Amino acid sequence: MRRASILAASATTLRTLAAIAAGAALWYAMRLCQGALRPVLGRVPEWAALAANAGVEEALRLGLALLIARYVRRAGLEPGTVGLGVVAACSLGALENASYLAAFPTLDAYWRLGYAVPIHAGAAALYAIGTGESKSPDGASRPTSWPAGIAAAFTLAWAWHSGFNIVAALFPFPALPIVGTVVNLIALSALVVALAIRYGYWSVYAAR
């Protein structure tokens, strides 16, 4: 019994480390894709370039969420394991902000942690809600989300991400870091609750 518990804990640790590594790979892929598009985006209005870059990032994040959801189903893991996408998104967000800090070592870079990382984590939580398969406490499977739902999640995450990028770059105001931090933490908290409800976290543990 103890050996099984140790093996389960080891597997969880390994999956978490793999998610962190996937986030790093996602960050690198994002930089490559955005770099390849730079010559084209240099010819369009800045707001459109910012929106396109956010779209690239969200498309890659959604792609990872879909891969994780497929892995979870094939491996027969608990449906809530799709939350590993949130871990990957936090890894990506940390690397992105570290790169900003290295390039622009100012207090603004530190403030970005407050409203940029929750955007990454929130988008990943939204995709985890939309791509996974949930189960009720009795073990019965619930249908996976429809493609339209996944597309809606992507559209919402892209619009939210683009909106903050555009405001931060083109229409900054002194209170933006504070407002952005508060708004994005509220949004992320709501998504975490929705994720817990989606995968029956409270009902499963209440039944134990």
Image: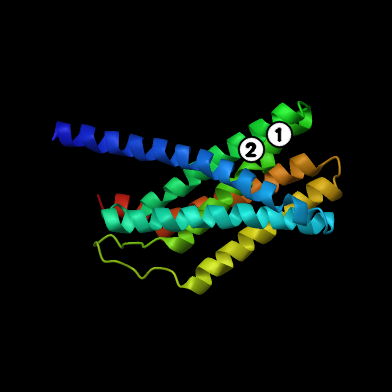
Q: Give the number of marks.
A: 2
> The N terminus is located in which quarter?
top left
Instruction: Please name the residue shown 51% across and 41% down the image.
Output: 25
Q: Amino acid type of disc 2? A: Glu
Relative to 154, residue 178 above or below: above
Image location of residue 195, percent across then percent down: 46, 55
Farthest residue to the left: give it. 1
Question: What kind of colouring is applied to the model shown?
Answer: rainbow
The part of the image, by quadrant, that contains residue 197 is bottom left
The part of the image, by quadrant, that contains residue 160 is bottom right
Judged from the image, the secondary structure of the residue bearing numbered disc 2 is helix
Judge by depth and name the residue closer to the eye, 68 or 125: 68
Report whether 206 appears left or right of 117: left
Judged from the image, the secondary structure of the residue bearing numbered disc 1 is helix
Relative to 197, residue 115 above or below: above
Relative to 50, residue 89 above or below: above
Instruction: Please name the residue shown 60% across and 55% down the image.
Output: 58
Cβ–Cβ below 8 Å for labels 1 and 2?
yes
**Residue to which mark 2 is pinned:** 96
Judge by depth and name the residue closer to the eye, 88 or 40: 40
Instruction: Please name the residue shown 40% across and 60% down the image.
Output: 132
Q: Amino acid type of disc 1? A: Tyr
Crowding at mark 1 (Cα within 10 Å: few <14, some 14-19, many 20+): some
Residue 100's tag is 1
Image location of residue 115, percent across then percent down: 68, 42
The answer for how far apart the CA atoms under marks 1 and 2 are is: 6 Å
Crowding at mark 2 (Cα within 10 Å: few <14, some 14-19, many 20+): many
In the rendered image, is residue 191 in sight?
no
Report whether 182 appears left or right of 25: right
Image location of residue 199, percent across then percent down: 38, 57
Report whether 144 appears left or right of 5: right
Image location of residue 101, percent across then percent down: 71, 29
